[in-house]
Amino acid sequence: DGGITQSPKYLFRKEGQNVTLSCEQNLNHDAMYWYRQDPGQGLRLIYYSQIVNDFQKGDIAEGYSVSREKKESFPLTVTSAQKNPTAFYLCASKLTGAPTDTQYFGPGTRLTVL
Amino acid sequence: EDQVTQSPEALRLQEGESSSLNCSYTVSGLRGLFWYRQDPGKGPEFLFTLYSAGEEKEKERLKATLTKKESFLHITAPKPEDSATYLCAVRGYGGSQGNLIFGKGTKLSVKP
């Protein structure tokens, strides 16, 4: 089945640690996105990538880093510089240039700082 | 600045009681308006894309409509399984670099 997978589903981090969230898609989509979701707030864009080996900062990139070495994969690292990382993280992808221009989302990773 | 406002924040309905959710938007040239459904602890599920004023789309008990300033998600004779948070997002030609701008969502509860 085609889709977007995120792992792990739950992640616990101690203060001062870096952690990496995985996002993989087998939809052959060009563009991939990372969002953060907090209670009572809309989804906020962290980073996005439209092609392999290229990515851009979104609205809240501070304290996060990404890489895009393969078309299928777009991992997100939450660094110790991110002051309030506890949130629900969502990965999305879309086919650029397609008529429908729709982003599809993965199941999410819930990160909790202990 | 591109902006999306959804109302109400929460809506409680009895099974079979039809209603509408509102999504008001401000965008520099609309490239698309998107509706998603999100269940607790899960990723958003795509429902509809609307591109121009007057456009309508339907799926089972849901119907989405679009004007130049807002979109409505009409729910006809809802069932308990329609309970979820409904998210609205817009994509414009302006300062958001073509990325999606999301509203905060409307949490719908349908009681049997």
Image (cartoon, rainbow, N blue to C red):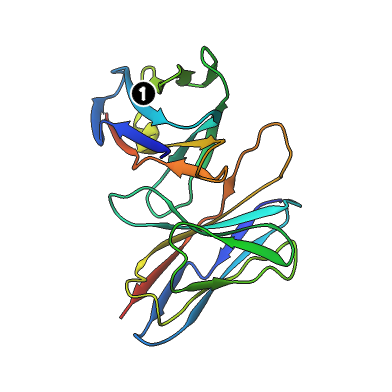
**Residue shown at the point (37%, 50%) measured from the top left:** B40
Chain holding disc 1: B
Q: Nearer the viewer, residue A72 or B95?
A: B95
Number of other residues with Cα within 10 Å of mark 1, as a class: few under 14, some 14 to 19, many 20 or more: many
**Residue shown at the point (71%, 45%) measured from the top left:** A95
- Residue underneath mark 1: B78
B97 left or right of B11?
right
**Residue shown at the point (28%, 49%) measured from the top left:** A40
**Residue shown at the point (69%, 64%) measured from the top left:** A54
Q: Quadrant of the N terminus of chain B?
A: top left
> Residue type at mark 1?
Pro
B5 left or right of A25?
left
**Toward which corner of the image does residue A96 lie, by quadrant?**
top right
Q: Position of residue A80 (x, y in %)?
A: 41, 82
Q: Quadrant of the C terminus of chain B?
A: top left
Residue furthest to the bottom in view is A16
SS type, badge 1: loop
Q: Position of residue B10 (x, y in %)?
A: 24, 35
Residue furthest to the top in view is B54
The relative height of residue B14 versus residue B4 in the rendered view (above or below) is above
B31 left or right of B17?
right
The relative height of residue A51 versus residue B93 in the rendered view (above or below) is below
Number of marks in the image? 1
